[in-house]
Image: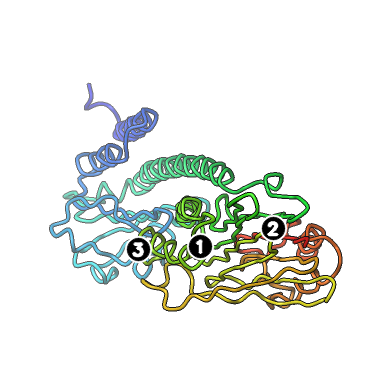
Amino acid sequence: MAANVPERLKISTFKLNALLAITQAINENLPKDDLLKRYEQILKEDLNIGKILIFKHNGVSWECILGSGIKDPKSYNINVDADLLKYSEITFVTSTSITSSSESFDIVIPVYNNSKPLAYVLIGDIEEEGEGVSPTIKHLHFIQTLSSIIIVAIENMRLFQESLRQIAIKKELELASRMQSMLIPKNDELPKNEHIWITSFYHPHLDVGGDYYDFIRLSENEVGFCIADVSGKGISAALLMSNFQANLRALFTSEISLPTLVEKLNERVLKSANGEKFITLFVAKYNYINKELEYINAGHNHPILYETKSKNLVFLKEGCVGMGMLDEIPVIRKGYIKVEQHTKLLCYTDGLVELMDDKEVEFGTTVLEQHISNNSDIKSNIDAIIEDQHILSGNKAIFDDITILGVEFYP
């Protein structure tokens, strides 16, 4: 009975059954290797193809996802860019067409998706019929269709897994961002009294950042504050900064001197960062009674101090190298300021002064000096800087975290 079935019907039935089997396998969410195994079985057992090689782009680079019938696995180390990108349609090739391979192939079948090459299928060792045309050549378009279905399905799996990974990363970043925001004091938690008035602005470039500022009440009449910046960005910088915050809060007391504090922090950073990152830090103490401000600038951007009565403006530079740069800090210089008049202090991270203007020139500190050199309160100064630099209104030149800490001293 089967012998009377027309040949064309048999072929059509075979193709439909093969496509149905592959479609069912895809609908069953079979893993990539199982799909490739079924694909390989159809080509080798039903179409008598001896060699099959598939190169697929994984979003980053080309990789071989199937090598069947190859004697030496190393022989298909093909340079896709050099050997295959030139093919945009089914092409018969010679033994010398693919120069990177010691194996010979007969046909290259490109698979495109959204007008971009997604994969290349190479087949070889085609079994010829005694008379007439090879059955493989007869079914090339079917092989191309089958290959497209399989490879697009595998690509969709990859994209789905990538989507899940991105969702997981996003949730982790959101959690890290919430945790980090808990470590950084809010504006209403900063002191605002007859002795000192502190305000802040924190704008991470990513969900989490490597900038940090803090305020610590050391005693009834003495407070400490700091601003810091980790080299680099992202999760690793945020983790190091969180560790740094814990160490600083544990070590910073009224009894410890600032040089000793910096030495101990340097040891902790070296241990945590393993020499791969460093932290710049400006840390200070202020005494309400004797009106003395002492500080150390450990490689950080120089804070700007402005005395409103005398109109004197200075940069606070005294200090040492950044935390984690050297095993031992050779010299630590402590700065000292006697606050005798209404004084403003503007601390900031490098993300603020490295902003570019329309001519791709860094703004530097000139703009900051202009904004602080007046009798306005420090919050008004910071608000003006934020507006002037378009920090909250889509400034495309922002490529780093931006943190500002403003302090006013009332003698």
Circle 2 SS class: loop
Q: Is residue 344 left or right of residue 160?
A: right
* Residue in the picture at 29% in, 56% down: 122
Residue 232, x across and y down, in percent: 49, 63
Q: Is residue 165 above or below residue 393?
A: above
> In the rendered view, would you say 16 is above or below 183?
above
Q: Which residue is mark 1?
A: 230
**Contact, mark 1 vs mark 3 (Cβ under 8 Å):** no
Q: Residue at x 39, y 66 (%)?
A: 276
Image-based side of 50 in relation to 284, left or right: left
The amino acid type found where label 2 is placed reads Tyr
Pick whichever, 21 or 267, lies toward us: 267
Q: Position of residue 22 (x, y in %)?
A: 34, 34
Pointer 3: what residue? Answer: 274
- Which of the two discs, 2 and 1, sits closer to the camera? 2
The disc, 2 or 3, on the residue closer to the chain's N-terminal end is 3
